[in-house]
Image (cartoon, rainbow, N blue to C red):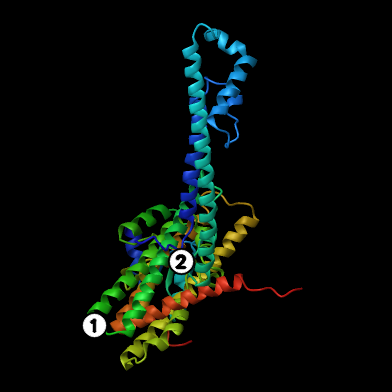
């Protein structure tokens, strides 16, 4: 879906979330701890919410939200992000987007 | 799977009830089958009476209840029929007594069996083996779908712990002896597969009753005390317990383990905060009285499932360590949990101070 493609290819870390989703919150906390400020797209109150969810699933995300894109590429949902981080492969991906401060 | 010294008892209890049920219905059946032919008084006979006396009773009975036999024939006209009926009475009463004797014997043996099992149970608890602490043997007919799923999970978990204990003993024996890296590798592989099996079991059970899994009801109390987010431990905490067992670590390994520990802590913190948020929103919904369909329960279930992410922690450790280190780590881990379980049971049975 066009909107999803456009939104996901924004620079840096992009996360599609729903305000009611606690795992979305968890993922945001993680990136914050890693000194990254992701672009958050809250889709719950979006009129195209259903369409966006379907598009995210079709792109290969295990659950529609949270959907994490880094540098325009889909990383995945909570599972994928956590696994990547444990294997030490997440930090290299986000390095260009990490704040030097705090 | 050997079941001779099974430390999980529920299935045994069912075994006892089964034959008793059968005997009971057998007893019933015998009454039904021999229903019409004799009066009740000929059945209720003390067991030590001889069959001969039965015929006397029946003949008295004949005098006392002539109307029964009038329907068939008078005494003078068909003596053989009477005799045959009397013989059948005797036979039936004899069989009745034998069945009763067998039934009572079965009760006695079952009673002894039960006592023996309860002793075994206590012994097992002392040694820290898993013993079902929540099985309701009174509810033999599970009408509730949820509880039967959970009972099934508890039984499966009991078997899992048995197998776990066996693997730990094997690891211990093997590590103290001479063993090739390849053979050790096989044991380590099996141990890992065993843990993954547990994760799968938990995930499936969470689908049935997520609160049950999240509150760790199937675990021993001491394990529950240290529990984090649905029946497990914080991997970073586990790492602290296991680290000394990995010595000596190469510099590269040490670096890798430290990095893993840090990313683990970060992942754990993020997930914990997410779970807190879920609890808050859930509590708010309950307070506001609006907990309907499509509410937060499904979220909890998926949160539970997403904890698979931490399964990858186990994978990561596996990647970093040598086979021998992994074996030692698994042994230490297993023993740690065994000790926790033993702590639970010894705490539960401690002598209380007189007040």
Q: Secondary structure at mark 1?
A: loop
Whether residue B68 sits left or right of residue B199 in the image: it is right
Residue linked to disc 2: A24
Please give the chain letter of the residue carrying mark 1: B
Q: Is residue B190 visible?
A: yes
Please name which of the two marks, 1 or 2, marks the residue nearer to the observer: 1
Residue occupying the point 51% across, 24% down: B89
Q: Nearer the viewer, residue B149 or B39?
A: B39
Q: Is residue B128 above or below residue B13?
A: below
Nearer to me, B150 or B298 = B150
Q: Is residue B99 above or below residue A75?
A: above
Question: Residue B179, image x and y in percent?
Answer: 26, 82
Of the 4 image quadrants, the one containing the C terminus of chain B is bottom right
How far apart, in angstroms, are the residues tagged by discs 1 and 2? 46 Å
Q: Residue B103: give its label.
A: none
Q: Please tell me how crowded label 1 is: few (under 14), some (14-19), or many (20+) other residues with Cα within 10 Å.
A: few
Label 2 marks a residue whose chain is A
Which residue lies at the image location 49% right of the left edge and 32% below the top edge?
B95
Q: Are marks 1 and 2 on the same chain?
A: no
In the image shown, does A32 or B213 lie closer to the viewer? B213
Q: Which x, y percent locates residue A81?
A: 37, 71
Farthest residue toward the right?
Answer: B355
- Give residue B245's position: percent from left, percent from top: 39, 87
- Where residue B180 is drawn, which disc sits there? 1
B60 relative to B86 in the view: left or right: right
Structural crowding at the residue carrying mark 2, measured as other residues with C-alpha within 10 Å and reported as few (<14), some (14–19) or many (≥20): many
Q: Quadrant of the N terminus of chain B?
A: bottom left
Q: Is residue A90 visible in this depiction of the protein?
A: no
């Amino acid at each position: 879906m066009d909107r999803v493609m456009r939104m996901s290819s924004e620079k840096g870390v992009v996360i599609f979330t729903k305000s009611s989703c606690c795992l979305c919150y968890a993922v945001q906390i993680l990136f914050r701890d890693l000194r990254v400020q992701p672009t958050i797209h809250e889709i719950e109150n979006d009129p195209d919410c259903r369409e966006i969810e379907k598009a995210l699933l079709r792109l290969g995300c295990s659950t529609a939200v949270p959907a994490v894109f880094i540098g325009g590429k889909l990383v995945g949902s909570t599972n994928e992000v956590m696994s990547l981080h444990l294997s030490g492969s997440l930090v290299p991906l986000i390095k260009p987007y990490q704040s030097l401060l705090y | 799977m050997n079941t001779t010294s099974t430390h999980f008892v529920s299935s045994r209890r069912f075994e006892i009830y089964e034959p008793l049920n059968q005997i009971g219905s057998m007893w019933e059946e015998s009454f039904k089958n021999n229903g019409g032919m004799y009066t009740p008084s000929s059945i209720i006979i003390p067991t030590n009476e001889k069959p001969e006396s039965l015929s006397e009773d029946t003949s008295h009975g004949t005098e006392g209840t002539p109307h029964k036999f009038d329907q068939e024939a008078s005494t003078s006209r068909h003596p053989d029929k009477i005799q045959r009926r009397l013989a059948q009475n005797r036979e039936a009463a004899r069989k009745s007594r034998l069945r009763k004797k067998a039934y009572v014997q079965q009760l006695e043996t079952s009673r002894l069996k039960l006592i023996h099992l309860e002793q075994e149970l206590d012994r097992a608890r002392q040694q820290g083996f898993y013993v079902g602490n929540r099985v309701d043997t009174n509810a033999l007919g599970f009408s509730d779908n949820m509880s039967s799923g959970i009972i099934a999970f508890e039984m499966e978990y009991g078997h899992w712990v048995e197998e776990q204990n066996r693997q730990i003993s094997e690891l211990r024996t093997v590590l103290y002896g001479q063993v090739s890296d390849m053979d050790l590798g096989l044991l380590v592989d099996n141990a890992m597969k065993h843990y993954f099996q547990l994760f799968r079991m938990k995930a499936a059970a969470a689908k049935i009753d997520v609160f049950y899994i999240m509150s760790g009801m199937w675990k021993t109390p001491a394990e529950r005390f240290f529990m984090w987010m649905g029946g497990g431990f914080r991997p970073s905490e586990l790492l602290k317990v296991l680290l000394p067992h990995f010595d000596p670590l190469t510099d590269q390994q040490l670096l890798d383990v430290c990095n893993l520990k840090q990313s683990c802590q970060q992942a754990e913190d993020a997930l914990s905060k997410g779970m807190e948020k879920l609890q808050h929103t859930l509590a708010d919904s309950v307070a506001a009285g609006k907990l309907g369909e499509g509410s937060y329960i499904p979220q909890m279930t998926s949160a539970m499932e997403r904890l698979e992410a931490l399964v990858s922690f186990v994978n990561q450790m596996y990647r970093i360590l040598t086979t021998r280190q992994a074996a030692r780590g698994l042994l230490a881990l297993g023993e740690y949990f065994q000790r926790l379980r033993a702590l639970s049971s010894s705490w539960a049975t401690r002598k209380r101070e007189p007040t």
